[in-house]
Amino acid sequence: MEQAADAPLKKTPLNARHRASGARMVPFGGWDMPVEFSGLSAEHNAVRTRAGLFDVSHMGEIEIAGKDALAAVQRLSSNDASKLHVGQAHYSGLLSPQGTFVDDLLVYRLAPTHFMLVVNAGNIPKDYAWIAEHVQGVGDAVAVDSSSRYALIAVQGPKALEVLQPLTDVDLAGMKYYWFGHGEVAGARATVSRTGYTGEDGFEVFVPPQSADKLWLAILEAGKACGVIPCGLGARDTLRLEASMRLHGNDIDETTTALEADLGWIVGWKKDDFIGAAALREQKARGLKRKIVGFEMVERGIGRHGYDAWIGDAKAGHVTSGTQTPFLKKAIGMAYLPIEHTAVDTEFDIDIRGRRTRARVVPMPFYKRQK
Amino acid sequence: MASYPSNLKYTKDHEWIDLAGDKGKVGITDYAQAQLGDVVYIELPDVGAKLKQGQSFGTIESVKAVSELYSPVTGVVAEVNAALKEKPEVVNKDPHGSWMVVITLTNPSEAGALLDAAQYQDLIK
């Protein structure tokens, strides 16, 4: 990421708590983060069957406000923010003029002319510089990097609501998916959104950093009877992969367009001009040369990030994410393949350490929660 | 607390070897399988492959990572556990009972440099 090799790792407000719990810590995007607490499988399956607790305070929050804030967001963000009610969020892309991903993000409409963009931790400085540059021409709008003002804790799983509701005055049952509300959680001033990166029901709780530790402990205590456990970045990755959610840096980046990434649904095609619009419209008209697919290994092996994909005797694409996941217990992943080879059931080979191993295109998402 | 059989010898790369005459059965330790996580694939050499002590003889892949397997001794591969390749997950369940290869030692005096159970447990403390 954009970090000097010897710069000290950044810490979330829960760093000491994680270390005291014996979490295995790793550097991630310039941050010292827990990769696992009790074990990747246990954590992954806890989220699929009960609930898990994630510290995602490293994520960035960039706020855009002013009379022309909507125009600024519409210009920068691919999705149509005019459709957002106050209290509603959506998934979107910060696209380059080529229609490729500077980052993917969630856009929250806090007020008619006040938006919060939640971005990936490793991209915060890049995203802020990009946003600050592009709001300049829009009118009365400013962008502020508010990341240091928020800790973010995610409770994810079928029991998330049951665990969190007793701790908050915010009406969680009445909150629709991708909406949010403000109130208190465990005595801390909070914004709670019904969002997440796991494919389960769940909530993400934004609190001031000094409230994070108390909130973390309160949720673990409240969730004890249900078996809520802390979960690290390892499980976060296997969960999002099962749910077919893209990871910037793996499945999407500055070389992949929104259409190639099969994310045309986050593009506000009817909007006025936005960054990347012309490139995407042109690509839509011309047709794609390649597209992302979900795959399952047919032969024994794991197709991992960076491995080459072969069709017959020719190198044809590459794997962007892949592993064997603990709930589905299958080796799955995503890869870019030539458009003519992207139909479901297409078979292709993945070069696994010199061994061409058979895989098959399958529909995404690999996993979908009930109800 | 895992138990490390006293009849086995160990290496600092977390392999064990069960020596009988000039042959040694080789596998990975409980510590190794716990570090790896769920094993999904094992790549083993062909019978007849010549190995030097410390040389890689294959790979073991878990959900998390791929690791090399290092030969505890110099010799020739006499047998390969094909059944293990079909069901690599048994390594997690029974690491000290899951042999991967049998090696015919060509330099038996090397065995003296291997760790015993007590020394190995000190190493992983």
Image (tube, coloured by chain):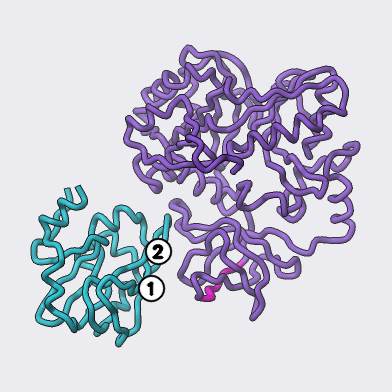
Chain colours: A purple, B cyan
Residue with the mark numbered 2: B61
Mark 1 and mark 2 residues within 8 Å of each other at the beta carbon = yes
Q: CA distance from mark 1 to mark 2?
A: 8 Å
On screen, residue A359 versus residue A301, left or right, reads right
Helix, strand or loop at disc 2? strand
Task: Give above or below for B118 relative to A229.
Answer: below
Circle 1: residue type:
Glu
The image's mark for residue A234 is none
- Residue A165 lies, in percent from the top left, at 49, 21
Which picture quadrant has residue B11? bottom left
Range shown magenta: A355-360
Report if residue A356 lies within the magenta region. yes
Report if residue A143 lies within the magenta region. no
Answer with mark 1 or mark 2, whichever residue precedes in sequence: 1
Q: Residue at x 60, y 57 (%)?
A: A320
Q: Residue at x 50, y 43 (%)?
A: A236
On screen, residue A288 versus residue B3, left or right, reads right
- Residue A133 lies, in percent from the top left, at 79, 32
Query: Same chain for marks 1 and 2?
Result: yes
User: Disc 2: which chain?
Assistant: B
Task: Give above or below for A344 relative to B2.
Answer: below
Residue with the mark numbered 1: B43
